[in-house]
Amino acid sequence: MSISLPPSTKNNIEKLQPTGWLRYFSFSLDHKVIGIQYLVCGFIFYLIGGLLAGAIRIELTSPISDFMPREVYNQVLTLHGTIMIFLWIVPVVNGAFGNYLIPFYVGARDMAFPRLNAVAFWLIPPAGLLLISSYFINGAAQSGWTAYPPLSITTPAAGQIIWIISVLLLGGSSIFGGINFIATILKLRRPGLKLMQLPMYCWAMLGTSILVVLSTPVLAGTLILLSFDIVAHTGFFNPSLGGNVIVYQHLFWFYSHPAVYIMVLPAFGLVSEILPVHSRKPLFGYTTMVYSIMAIVALGLVVWAHHMFTSGTPPWMRLFFTIATAFIAVPTGIKFFNWVATLWGGRISLNSAILFSCGFIVNFVLGGITGVALAQVPFDVHVHDTYFVVAHFHYIVYGGSVFVIFSSIYHWYPKFTGKMLNEKIGKLHFAITFIGFNLCFAPQHWLGLNGMPRRVAEYDPQFAFVNQLSSIGALLMALSTLPFLWNVLYSIFKGEESGDNPWKALTPEWLTTSPPPVENWIGEAPLVTEPYGYGEKQARKASSKPNSDQ
Amino acid sequence: MTTVSPINKQSNELTAHKEEHADHRLFGLITFLIADGMTFAGFFAAYLTFKAVNPLLPDAVYELELPLPTLNTILLLVSSATFHKAGKALEKSNSKKCQYWLLITASLGIAFLISQMFEYFTLPFGLTDNLYASTFYALTGFHGLHVTLGAIMICIVWWQSRSPGGRVTASNRFPLEAAELYWHFVDGIWVVLFIILYLL
Amino acid sequence: MPPKTGVYAILISLALIIACIWASNNLSLLPADASSNAPIYDELFNVLFVIGTILFVGMTGLVIYSLIQFRRKPGEEGDGLAIKDNLPLEILWTAVPAVVILFVGLYSYDIYERMGGMQTLNHDVHNQHSMSSEERLWGGIGTLKEDNAEIKEFPINVELTAMQFAFLFNYPKGEIISGELHVPVGQPVSMKMESKDVIHAFWVPEFRLKQDVIPGQPTILNFTPTKTGRYPIICAELCGPYHGGMRSTVVVEEPEEYDAWFQKNSKSTEVEL
Ligand code: HEA
Ligand code: HEA
Ligand code: CUA
Ligand SMILES: [Cu+2]
């Protein structure tokens, strides 16, 4: 079946590229280098965002505003939200793993547009530095990551404008990435490879990229209008000049609701890759998984106003958005049941990768359930803009996406470096993270239900104890990064050699050396039509043909 | 659009590592235009909502003059046709004719921009006068920016098609095709904009 | 599934359901209920809580069970079973959540209807508040359905003005302007809300009600307090540095006390209730 490829010809561009560790600091066109760049850069921003979260939690250990001035608190929470979303989760689940894995999965030697790809990455560090620098220049934006006008128009302009510019840059990066993924998955597939034979992560990235391409530009347009309001004193969203603040909210959430699926669909894809390998079973229900991704994409575009139930939207609109939102639970549920079915009857290696993936399932189900509750208008009317919402989305973004990122790092680290991570330390990392995470965010449900609004630096003293519990949880989470960092850094140098395929996985990225050569395969690209061909009854010949010479 | 034989296409795909093949670039451009179109869609949605729920006081409502914008519409529509001609000419390797049509297209585009400028100066309202005025300028301005970009692209394509060893030839039509696609897109947006802004 | 496992599964599920219902009725997860829609809200909360807990515990149980039962024991080789899909199972776990969602959706619609959320507000409010006919209302929450039929005119009309960083309550009848909201227990209140600067939100956790206060777009909120006491009014929309300090109190008092307060503060003397 396999078609022979012409021997790889390294062209001039590559010869000019630095090699060794220097290449990670260059305008490299190699998708694997770009993937690692995204990952490391994102992780650094995660540490910064986590530091800011730490500042938030310290402030909230006491009911009065004593740790930092109130304006600074608002700046910190705005930066925390923006950094975590736009500089950590989105670039890592899409950019990092997407760039690293997608070309392997479609059997290509690189992404469809390598230069665009490098540009997309190199927009991120300057945008991030710009965003953070605004804090030191004139005070960062302080109207929350949602930047609702008229607050965002009336707070100091410099910080808000810088915020807008960096979000525009990051949005641009995201759109370029999205275009690249769509083109790579649809156009660069190796001949003979059918769409329905692709690993699930490709489908997740296809769906995500469709969302990126359709919704990010709307955010860009909206922010441009907002910046006009700030700089040129137009009145789009300024009620004192005849504008309408609700229109901003509609446009903003038209992007930012799909954005939550941009943060989680790729994570779904990654889990779908990890679970079958470590439980030695085929991914359960491939076809329904594909359809449910597409259903989530379609539904995800029409549920945005569930963030606006108290904004004076008309009743019919609330009703429509309630129903549409709640129905996302159905395709999402299919995926979860399929994952459990994948575990069921397997030969599960209880390693760090699988622990983090299972932690993800548990946390996300809780976050999803509170999401479905929030989708009910009468329920949301009480808890909107309270810590209940904060708990909901941290259960999903941290308990979901971040857990998956950790799981993926444990899974693909041998691929990236050719070294194994230390399992004992990995399990310790999991234990502290899981406990710390739940201790931090579970009590926040109660806080929200009982009357603590979000985005406040001072609160009713009756909530002090529960807030302190939550802060202890945050401390544990901060501590949990230490074993992880040590593990990752130490193992690069001293880690046990992993060999090419330590997990005996069948997906294409494992059918080459670890780390892979510049153009992914030394000889021809293997044709993998059954990426999940594990299982006893089927002799493990599969139809994949690993490289014979390496 | 492009006629690549299956075999040719296949081998292209297999070697398409560091090269950005025209086929994929065109596909990428289409995806980008969808994204760009969504920006406009956002603007249109905002404008229509403003209009529906924030009616202006009667003295702030202006009747827009129709002749100039109608002329603009015609200019753009004709320029789409002339661009198409240029493309056809290039396909037939008639680069002289192609350049001729390209120049005409570019001039039509520039004429559009001048006439748009002229309209701006004669309008009875400024950017910050009221919600309607702001939206009007935001929409037409954003579109004007696209036309400017398109005109520049046409000029570049024209320049590149002049020298015999240039980059735009019958065998490498991608730059022209990309510019053409973009230009049709900008025209399409104008038609929608014209209907929403001037006729509704 | 062997019959014995099935019996266990059913028993465990039953125990779980009973435990959930017990927990939802006996754990106090919500503050006191002090308005006529609070008990309705709590009813919804309990239902969601039971469904949610069952789902969560069930899924977690399945994951933990799989991890323990199907873990690779030392020295074990080979793969799991090559089961790729199972159509009846997949139909089952599409249909069951769909039914649950449908039920939850219809139920919460009913709750919302009873809370007065689905009312068109414009028409029954126009003559109550000082509004020009041009002005347009932007939704909010109407009167409780049960009360709705009887109300021709609200006994208590309040106009709320929010600004950075305070709530001001205006009683047009008595020309009272107050920083605290005083309302008599058991009487429907209609409140028209408008903001002077940025978006704020009026939230009383004990009433289970929240509505944004939006500049340029008046909103309406109707409610009936049912328990006397002092409850916090909290601004729930980020509105600037002192957002956390933007709080006030709603004082729900016996009608006589309310009248006394009203008379004492009223500027126009001819008002009577
Ligand atoms: C990755 C991010 C992510 C994801 C995936 C989700 C997923 C969901 N979210 Fe969440 N959400 C956020 C991030 C996310 N959210 C953020 C950041 C905010 C706050 C924004 C801000 O204001 O700052 C927010 C806020 C938010 C609100 C607004 C709250 C408010 O401000 O008042 C609502 C309301 O409907 C909501 C609902 C949902 C629902 C229904 C889902 C569903 O997709 C969940 C579906 C999943 C499941 C249900 C679990 C698995 C399913 C089963 C096991 C099947 C059986 C289940 C049932 C039958 C119930 N979310
Ligand atoms: C998208 C991802 C994401 C992630 C991963 C997190 C992670 C965390 N978040 Fe975040 N959060 C948001 C997204 C996210 N958050 C958003 C969108 C908002 C809303 C903002 C808004 O309202 O506008 C928010 C708001 C928010 C609030 C509410 C603030 C308020 O409303 O007043 C709180 C409060 O507890 C909080 C806490 C935390 C904590 C403790 C973590 C922890 O999980 C963090 C754990 C990580 C660490 C602790 C890192 C460890 C590193 C160090 C300690 C530094 C070491 C430094 C060096 C080595 C240099 N977050
Ligand atoms: Cu007013 Cu927050
Ligand atoms: Cu949402």
Image (cartoon, rainbow, N blue to C red):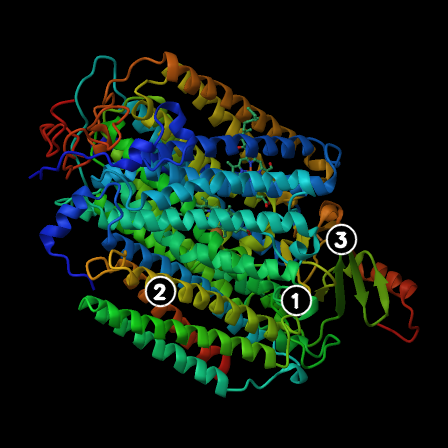
Residue A346, given in percent of the width and then of the height, sits at: 23, 28
Q: Is residue B147 left or right of residue C230?
A: left
Q: Chain of mark 1?
A: C
Residue C240, given in percent of the width and then of the height, sits at: 71, 50
Q: Chain of mark 2?
A: B
- The quarter of the picture where residue B32 lies is bottom left
Residue nearest the viewer, comparing A386 with A2: A2
Above or below: residue A273 compared with residue C155:
above
Residue A66, given in percent of the width and then of the height, sits at: 75, 33
Three-letter code for the amino acid on which mark 2 is drawn: Tyr
Three-letter code for the amino acid on which mark 1 is drawn: Thr
- Tag 1 and tag 2, C-beta contact below 8 Å: no
Other-residue count near label 2 (Cα within 10 Å), few / some / many at <14 / 14–19 / ≥20: many
Does residue B167 show up?
yes
On the same chain, marks 1 and 3? The answer is: yes
Q: Chain of mark 3?
A: C
Other-residue count near label 1 (Cα within 10 Å), few / some / many at <14 / 14–19 / ≥20: many
Give the alpha-carbon distance from disc 1 to disc 3, as whole Å. Answer: 26 Å
Tell me the residue at 44%/44% (across/down): A368
Q: Which residue is mark 3?
A: C228
Tell me the residue at 51%/73% (across/down): B48
Q: Which residue is mark 1?
A: C219
Query: Marks 2 and 3: which is nearer the front?
Result: 2
Q: What is the number of the mark on residue B182? A: 2
Tell me the residue at 48%/82% (across/down): B69
